[in-house]
């Protein structure tokens, strides 16, 4: 895909950066753009930022963008927020900046370089207790040390040792 077109008056000042986050965590991508035309939210021009995912796939469920216009500076900033990162959110993302002119009925745009989101899988450990004739009880172990973080696709070998009591 094309990026960095820098067409008539539109400039991406800061594009989104590659980032890594943990599964179920939060990550943000930020994009800032400016215009040499009139104010981004007043008069006859409007400067906007939208987000897209590689290949036109929909943005992840639950993601949202926060946009703030800076009228005195003819600029706008948008942050794409992933509040509950999932493994399938790992992808390339782009910000697209549009400058619409209401006087001429035209729009110019610029597209950022892609930003890659990498998602690290979080390993969750559980204790399982079951007495004869009773329901199985599962409790997440939250005080286990050390913490283990693996990149997607990495291997981990875990040895489990159990004991039987009361039997």
Image: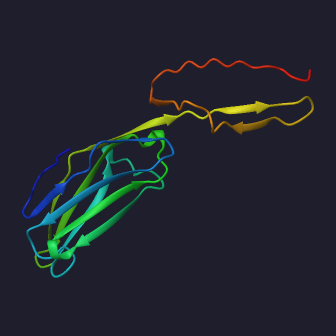
Point out the image quarter for the C terminus.
top right
Count every numbered label the image shows and give the total. 0
Q: Residue at x 84, y 31 (%)?
A: 130
Seen in the picture, residue 113 relative to 163 is either above or below; the reply is below
The quarter of the displayed image where residue 66 is located = bottom left
Seen in the picture, residue 127 relative to 15 is either above or below; the reply is above
Seen in the picture, residue 57 relative to 130 is either above or below; the reply is below
Q: Report the side of 38 relative to 84 (left or right).
A: left
User: Where does the image place residue 85, in percent across and percent down from the top left?
Assistant: 47, 46
Seen in the picture, residue 23 relative to 84 is either above or below; the reply is above
User: Where does the image place residue 4, in percent across and percent down from the top left?
Assistant: 13, 50
Q: Residue at x 16, y 57 (%)?
A: 13
User: Where does the image place residue 82, in percent across and percent down from the top left?
Assistant: 43, 52
Is residue 101 in sight in this rendering? no
Q: Nearer the viewer, residue 134 or 99?
A: 134
The quarter of the displayed image where residue 69 is located = bottom left
Is residue 158 in sight in this rendering? yes
Q: Residue at x 56, y 33 (%)?
A: 123
User: Where does the image place residue 19, in percent across and percent down from the top left?
Assistant: 33, 43
Q: Report the side of 85 relative to 39 (left or right).
A: right
Q: Residue at x 31, y 66 (%)?
A: 67
Q: Report the side of 70 relative to 162 (left or right).
A: left
Q: Report the side of 100 relative to 94 (left or right).
A: left
Identify the residue at the far bottom of this view. 43
Point out the image quarter for the N terminus.
top left
Figure coloring = rainbow
């Amino acid at each position: 895909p094309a990026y960095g077109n820098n067409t008539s008056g539109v400039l991406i000042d800061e594009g989104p950066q590659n980032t890594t986050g943990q599964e179920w965590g939060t990550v943000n991508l930020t994009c800032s753009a400016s215009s040499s035309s009139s104010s981004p939210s007043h008069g006859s021009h409007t400067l906007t930022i939208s987000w897209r995912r590689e290949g036109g796939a929909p943005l992840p469920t639950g993601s949202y963008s926060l946009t703030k216009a800076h009228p005195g500076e003819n600029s706008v900033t948008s942050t794409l927020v992933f509040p509950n990162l999932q493994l399938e959110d790992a992808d390339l993302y782009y910000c697209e900046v549009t400058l619409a002119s209401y006087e001429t009925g035209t729009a110019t745009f610029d597209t950022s370089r892609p930003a890659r989101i990498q998602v690290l899988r979080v390993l969750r450990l559980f204790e399982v207790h079951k007495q004869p004739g009773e329901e199985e009880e599962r409790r997440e172990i939250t005080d286990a040390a050390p913490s283990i973080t693996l990149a997607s696709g990495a291997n981990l070998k875990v040895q489990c040792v159990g004991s039987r009591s009361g039997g």
